[in-house]
Amino acid sequence: MSEDQPLLEVENLHVSFPIRKGFFQRTVGAVQAVNGVSFSVPRGTSFGLVGESGCGKTTVARAVLQLVEPTAGAIRFDGEDVAKMDAVALNRFRGRVQAVFQDPFSSLNPRMSTGRIISEPLRVHRLTPESQIKAEVARLLDMCGLPARFADLYPHEMSGGQRQRVGIARALAMKPELIVCDEAVSALDVSIQAQIINLLEDLQKELNLTYLFIGHDLSVVRHICDQVAVMYLGRIAETAPSDPLFAAPRHPYTQALIDAVPNPDPDYEAGRHIAPLEGEVPSPANPPSGCFFHPRCPLVTDRCRQEAPHLDPVAPAHFAACWETAQTVPAE
Amino acid sequence: MTLLRVENLAIDVARDGGSCRLVHDAHFSVDRGETLAVVGESGSGKSLTALAVMGLLGEGLSVSGGRILFGDEDLAQMSPQARNDLRGSRISMIFQEAMTSLNPVRSIEHQLIEGMRLKKRLSRRAARARALELLAEVGISDPERRLKQYPHQLSGGMRQRVMIAIALACDPELILADEPTTALDVTIQAQILALTSRLCRDHGVGLVLITHNLGIVARYAQKVAVMYGGRVVERASARQLYRAPQHPYTQGLLASVPRLDLPRDTPLRPIPGAPPDPTVRLGGCRFHPRCPRASDLCATEVPPFVTDGGHEVACLHSGSQSSKPKGAAA
C-alpha cells in the first residue's frame, strides 16, 4: 500500500444489463452500459466522469460502490481487488468508500432527523460510543457549515443546499477515503451550487479525500477535477488532465460538448462559430458499428464505420479514442 | 415596436384566509423578433410571471396589481374568453418537460392540429399539411410516420421539437419558453435553443426565454431581466449586463458560476445564505439579508429603478465597483 499507488483502479470494466421480454421475461438481449472502461485515481485527487444521459457514467459509479455487479473487469481499491474481498474486508471497504447523490430529497430518509441520518453509519459500524455520538454529529455538521441545532431538524425543514450539506456530513461520518459524488451539485440553484462546490474542495484539502465526481455540467467538472474522462455510449472517448482536455480536446465529441456549453459572456459567444452536433445519442441496446460516435461525427471516415478506435496516448496522461485526431501525433 | 410590456406585475396566492405575495414587481418588455431572457433561481417568480402572461395561473393564484400590455390591450383586464382566443394563437408557450406537457394518449398529429383546427378554423386536411411542414421545419425526419406516433415513442429532444412545432402552429407573435432545455443533454440543448431562436428571428416572433443558466442568456438573448425574490432587480441589454452588472445579486450570480472561458483555478465566490422564503414577510430590498453592500436603509426602503443609458437597476448602492467576474483569476 505504497503512497504512489492509486487509491482506485478500474480496469477494463464491463457492465451489461439483460433485456427481458414477454410473459416469461426471457432474456432477448443485453444493454452494454459500460464497455471496457479503465482509469485510475491517485489518492487526494478528483477524477471526473462526464457525458450525456445513457453514457454509463452513473453505472461506473454504481459498480465502484458495489451496487451493481460488473460483468467483467476489475475494481481495485488501495491495491486490493474488491471482487475478491471477504465479508470482513468488504464491510471495511463500504466504510472507506462513501457516496453523495444528486437529489438531496430522495437520498435522505424523510422520517429520520438529521442527527439520526448522520449517526446511523456510526452506530451500524460501531465507530463511536453512544455517549459521544451527539458530539460527533455536531462536529460533522460544523464541518459542513451547519449549526448543531440542525441535528433535530427533518429533511423537509431544510433547503436544498442544507440537505446536500447533510448528505455530505453523512458521507464524512465514516471517515472515508473515497467519496463518489454522483451529480452531487446538479439539482442546486446557481448561488447554492457554488457554496457546495467550495465545501467539497475545502473538505478535500482538509481530509485528503479522493473524489470520483460524476457530472454532466462540463464547467463544474472542469473546476473540481484534476483528471477527466469523457464517456460516450459506455466507452471512454477521451481522458486527460482538466486543463489540456478543455484547452486542446482531441476527440470530436469532446469538442462538440465544449461547443455546446454557452459561456456567460455575450461578446465571447458572438464571436464563436459553432455547428451544433447533429442527431442524438443512439440506444446502448443497439449501438452503431465501429466507433460508437461515427453517426454524429463531422470527421467520419470508412474506417470509423468498421473498426472501433483504441484509447491511444496523444500527450502525457492524455488519451483519445479517435482514428482521425488521435493518430496525428506519435504516441509517447 | 413593443410587443409585450409587463408593468409592476404582482401575483398573490390565497393562503390561510389571507394572501401572500409571490411576485412583487415584475417589469420588462419585449419587441418583435427579439429575445428577452428572464433569469432567476427557483422561487424568484420567473415561471409564475410567464404563467400570468399566458393567463394560466393555477387555482388560488391571481394577478393583484400591474399591467400586462400586449399591443395596446391589457391582458390582466381581459375577459377569460378573450384570453382564451389569444392563447395558442397569438401567444403560445413552450414548457420545460415535454413528456408531461404532451398528452400521452393522443397522437402527435392530434396534438399538432388541435390548435390550428380550433383557433384558425383550418380543415383537417389543411391542418395536416401544415403539421407536416412544421415537423420538417423543426428538424424531425420522416414527418409522415412521426405524426402517427405517441409521445412515449419519441426521445426527449424530439418531444421538445414537437412542443416547438405546436407553439409555432398558429403563427404566434409571442412565445414564452419556460426552461425549455433544462431536462435535456447539452448537445441536444444546443440544437433546441439554436432552432428556437432561429425560428423566432425568421418569423419575427418575440421570445421570452426563462432560464437559470447565465450562459444560455449570453448566447441567445438580446435583453435580460434578472429576477430575485419576486422582483425584477436589473434590466439591460445582454451586453451591458455582462460587461458591467450593477446589482449586487447579478454580480454575485456571475461570480458563482464556474466557466470554461476562465482559468480553472478561478475561485468561485458564492452568495452566502439562501433565497428568501416567499411566505415570510421581508421589508425593503429582497436581497438585503445576503447582500455584501446592505445598509440599514436597505432593510426598510424598497429601492426604486434607476436608469443609466437603458441599463436599469433597483438598488440603493448599485454600481460595478465590486464586480470582477473577469479579473478574478488572480
Image: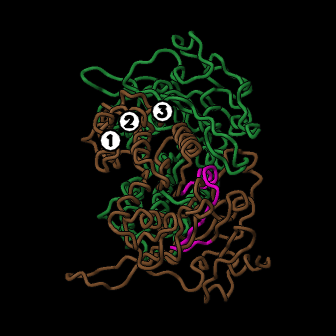
Q: Indicate the colour of chain B.
A: green
Q: Are marks 1 and 3 on the same chain?
A: yes
Mark 1 or 2: in front is 2
CA distance for labels 1 and 3? 17 Å
Image spot of residue B113 (x, y percent):
40, 62
Task: Report how far apart the C-alphas of labels 2 and 3 lie in the structure.
Answer: 14 Å
Residue under circle 3?
Answer: A145
Chain A rendering hue: brown
Disc 2 or disc 3, which is closer to the eye?
A: 2
Q: Quadrant of residue A264?
A: top right
Q: Which mark is residue A119?
A: 1
Three-letter residue code for mark 3: Gly
Q: Is residue A287 left or right of residue A41?
A: left
> SS of the residue at dot 3?
loop
Occupied quadrant, residue B298 = top right
Q: Which mark identifies residue A136?
A: 2
Q: Are marks 1 and 2 in contact (CB under 8 Å)?
A: yes
Gap between marks 1 and 2, in whole Å?
8 Å
Height in image: A176 above or below B314?
A: below
In this rendering, is residue A18 above or below B284?
Answer: below
How many other residues sit within 10 Å of disc 2, few (<14), some (14-19) or many (≥20)?
Answer: some
Question: Does A159 appear in magenta?
Answer: no
Q: Earlier in the sequence, mark 1 or mark 2?
A: 1
Q: Which residues are magenta?
A: A215-237
Tell me which amino acid carries mark 2: Glu
| Res. B1 visible in picture | no
Residue farthest to the left, as pictured: A23
